[in-house]
Structure formats: structure tokens, C-alpha cells
Amino acid sequence: MMASSYNAKEEDGPHSGTPGLGGAAVTKSKKPDNTAFKQQRLVAWQPILTAGTVLPAFFVIGIFFIPIGIALFVTSNNIKEFEIDYTGVDADSPCYSCAKDFSWNSTTSCTCSVDFKLEQPFESNVFMYYGLSNFYQNHRRYVKSRDDSQLYGDLSALTNPSKECEPYRTSNGLPIAPCGAIANSLFNDTLELYYVDSNGTRKEIPLVKKGIAWWTDKHVKFRNPGGNDNLTVSFEGNSKPVNWRKAVYELDPTDSENNGFINEDFIVWMRTAALPTFRKLYRIIQKKSSNTATLPSGNYVLEITYNYPVLSFDGRKRMILSTISWMGGKNPFLGIAYLTVGSICFFLGVVLLIIHHKYDTRNTSADIPS
């Protein structure tokens, strides 16, 4: 690749505002000083694009990007995913009565069940997600409505939460733990999955509730005040969030390592989503035997304890079953992007090569000095 360069030398002569030969001061000028920087004469390097440098670049990008795009796209398509909406918007939906009558002020839970069929078996570990739509967790005021010191187990923040938590800072004169709008809107639907065999007998699918949160969140960012032994005493002077039915120390009373601020369902929810349509990991279905599928094809029943109203903001709720690969979950965008860029570069390389050979009439021998 050819390039042009320019190395400036500072010109001789007096600068403006300096004494002249006779000792008298020269009239001050608005002209910039005669320096390489102010006169824009610094060393410059500019590539000269020629057919010999541009065409190989297009072909190399195309040759590398197209196979990578194919590999990413095929890998993404091999990931199995099943999604079912259980919001209950339509009158014939099994959860219609729950969605219509349930609100945050309801004192009793509403249950419904949704039947579905898996056409293909799910191998390896299967991840169960809940998905929400039209829920703006990325709203600036919503994102700030939390107290990280309180979530870290700071006793002073437990009795005097941050003002960022308003209006969910206190309730009935007591400080709320955990405070803020994010914690107050915790997703609290309960999902249970059953496999229906050929005899019509239901078999419950075991769902693993631990291991769904980031390690750094679980062990670094979230801690219970005073340890995990007696959380009832630790939160004795606090009130539960307004929309919660139970206190934070009752999230999982059977497991002290998954209760209080370190409850993994709570930790997952507190990591806010960037887009209004999102999914969060709910449970993991672990593969037990290499000879059988984790979820065989057939009929299933999803039992839902409907606690989370979404129709008030035109939201939707979904349950997603998905496998993963080395590149994560199902996402064809990256493969399509690589294929598109690679194909465009290769196509442009072919077109420019044809134009170069057809219309380049220069005498190359003239460029060689005699």
C-alpha cells in the first residue's frame, strides 16, 4: 500500500509579538504562531487506496465472515425452544378468569393450568424462563429505585434506607426491606411443570431453583444483615414491600442459603433488563441419564399460581423452555449479521474486480521510472 507523508520544518523568521532587528516591538498580529502545530504542518500519513489493496481486503473479509456466519446460524437453529403465553387475555384462555379478577390488592392466589405438547424431545439441560412484555425495567427512575448498601447487608441502610427508594422507602412508619420500586415489583408467579404419560398420569418435572443467579451477585453484591442464621431477628424492625405478601425472610425459609436478600429469584429480578420485552431465568431442569431425554416429546401441563397482574399496563407473560449451546441461548441475529457483511463484501469484491479489469486502460509501464 502506497502512502503519502509530510514532515514539516519550522520556518525561519521572527514570531509575532517578538522584538525585531532594531529592538522595537513588532506590532502584535492575530495570525497564529509559525509552528507546525498551529499552522497544521504536523507529520501526516494517508493511505492511498488502490485495486491491489482494496480488492483483497473485500475478499478476505468475505471468506472469513461467511463461514463464521454459517456456523453461528446453524448452532442457533440447533437450539430447541418452546414458548407459551399464559397471560389470559382471550376469553377462551385457561387463565382468563385469573387475569381478569386478580390485582395487587388480592389476598388469595388464583391457579390455572395450561396444556401443551412438545413435538421434539429436549436433550441436555433445559432452562425454564419467565418472560414479560411491555415492562420498562430500563426506566431511569425505576433503575435508581434501590439501595445497594441495604442489599449488601449494611445495618445502617436497613434502618435508614436511601431516599432513592421513595415512595417505597417506608411503610406504616417502618423502613421497608428491601426498599425501592424494583424490589416492590418482584415477579412472584409460581410455575410447576408436569409430564402426562400415555396412561394420563401426571409426573412432576423436578425444577432446580439454585444456580440461576450470577455468582458475583450471589456472593458479592447481596448479603443478609447479621448472617443467614436468624433472619427473623435481623429484619425485626422492618416492613415488607407494599406489594409483597410475605416478608423477605420468608422467601425460602427451608433453605438458609437461599433466603432473605440472597434468594436467587430475588437476585435475578433485581438485575434489571435493558429492553421492555425480556426473559429471566426461573428454573433449571437437569439431565439425569444419557439414555433418556430431559423432556421427552409428548403432552405436558403447566400449573400456574397467578400472582402477578400485567393487564393494567398491557403486559404479557410467557413461559419459555430452551436448551443452550456454546454461544448461549437461541439468537440468530449474530449469524445473520456475519453472513450479511461477508456476502456484501464478497459481492462488492467481485463487482469491483470486474470493473477494474474491464475499464482499467492505464499503461502500467508508464509508472515505472526509466
Image: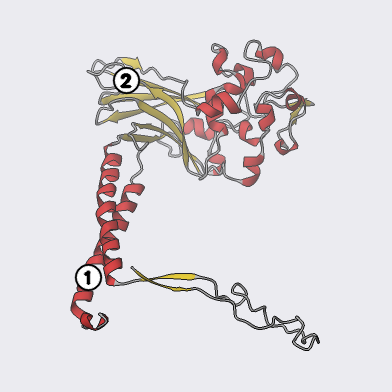
Q: Is residue 161 left or right of residue 45?
A: right
Residue 183 visible at all = yes
**Tag shown at residue 214:** none
Quadrant showing the C terminus: bottom left
Q: Is residue 315 left or right of residue 291?
A: right
The mark lying in front, picked from 2 and 1, is: 1
Q: For residue 351, what is the image quadrant?
A: bottom left
Determine the residue positioned at 43% across, 39% down.
Answer: 90
In the rendered image, the vertical position of residue 249 relative to residue 105, given as above or below: above
Considering the numbered disc 1 on the image, is that residue within a helix, a strand or a loop?
helix
On the image, the x and y values in percent for residue 191 come to 45, 24
For label 2, the residue is 287
In the rendered image, the vertical position of residue 6 relative to residue 128, given as above or below: below
Q: How many marks?
A: 2
On the image, the x and y values in percent for residue 313 come to 56, 43
Considering the numbered disc 2 on the image, is that residue within a helix, a strand or a loop?
loop
What amino acid is at disc 1?
Answer: Leu
What amino acid is at disc 2?
Answer: Lys
Q: For residue 270, what is the image quadrant?
A: top right
In the rendered image, the vertical position of residue 368 relative to residue 222, given as above or below: below
Q: Is residue 44 left or right of residue 223?
A: left
Query: Which of the pair 251/157 is nearer the observer?
Result: 157
Q: Are marks 2 and 1 in contact (CB under 8 Å)?
A: no
Residue 188 visible at all = no
**Tag shown at residue 353:** 1
Outermost front residue: 22
Real-space CA distance between mark 2 and mark 1, rounded to the nearest whole angstrom: 53 Å
Determine the residue positioned at 58% across, 30% down.
Answer: 186
On the image, the x and y values in percent for residue 256 come to 57, 13
Please report whichever mark, 2 or 1, sits nearer to the chain's N-terminal start. Answer: 2
